Amino acid sequence: MQRLAPVTQLLQAPLRCWAVPKAHVSAKPARTPTSPMEQAVGIFTMFVSFLVPAGWVLVHLESYKKSSVA
């Protein structure tokens, strides 16, 4: 156990010097409010960015199964 103490100190040393920056959280409302159209476009973009790749994989699942047989 005595040999493990220096090793654990070496592993913990880089963690001691890391400083986490303070988050800039504001309770004020936004300077420029987001319109409903901008919100809709943002939500649509997020859904498309997740669903299109998943849909691509599901559509081509049979071809993936056939090509992965060795």
Image: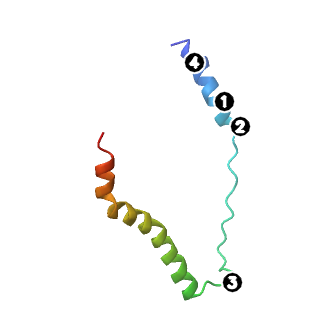
| Residue for badge 1 | 13
Q: Helix, strand, or loop for circle 3? A: loop
User: Which labelled disc corresponds to residue 41?
Assistant: none
Q: Is residue 48 left or right of residue 60?
A: right
* Number of the front mark, 2 or 3: 3
**How many angstroms separate mark 1 from mark 4 (CA)?**
12 Å
The crowd level at tag 4 (other Cα within 10 Å; few <14, some 14-19, many 20+) is few
Residue 27 screen position, x and y as percent: 64, 74
Depth check: give the residue in front, 69 or 40. Answer: 69
Q: Helix, strand, or loop for circle 2? A: loop
Is the residue 9 above or below the residue 51 in the image?
above
The crowd level at tag 3 (other Cα within 10 Å; few <14, some 14-19, many 20+) is few
Is the residue 18 above or below the residue 13 in the image?
below
Check contact, mark 2 vs mark 3: CB within 8 A: no
Q: Earlier in the sequence, mark 1 or mark 3?
A: 1
| Residue for badge 3 | 32
| Residue for badge 4 | 5
| Residue for badge 2 | 17
Q: Is residue 69 left or right of residue 25?
A: left
**How many angstroms separate mark 2 from mark 3 (CA)?**
38 Å
Residue 4 screen position, x and y as percent: 54, 16
Q: Residue at x 45, y 66 (%)?
A: 50
Callout 1, which amino acid?
Ala
**How many angstroms separate mark 1 from mark 3 (CA)?**
44 Å
Callout 4, which amino acid?
Ala
Q: Helix, strand, or loop for circle 4? A: helix
Callout 3, which amino acid?
Thr
Q: Earlier in the sequence, mark 1 or mark 4?
A: 4
Check contact, mark 2 vs mark 1: CB within 8 A: yes
Q: Helix, strand, or loop for circle 1? A: helix
Q: Is residue 2 left or right of residue 65?
A: right
**How many angstroms separate mark 3 from mark 4 (CA)?**
55 Å
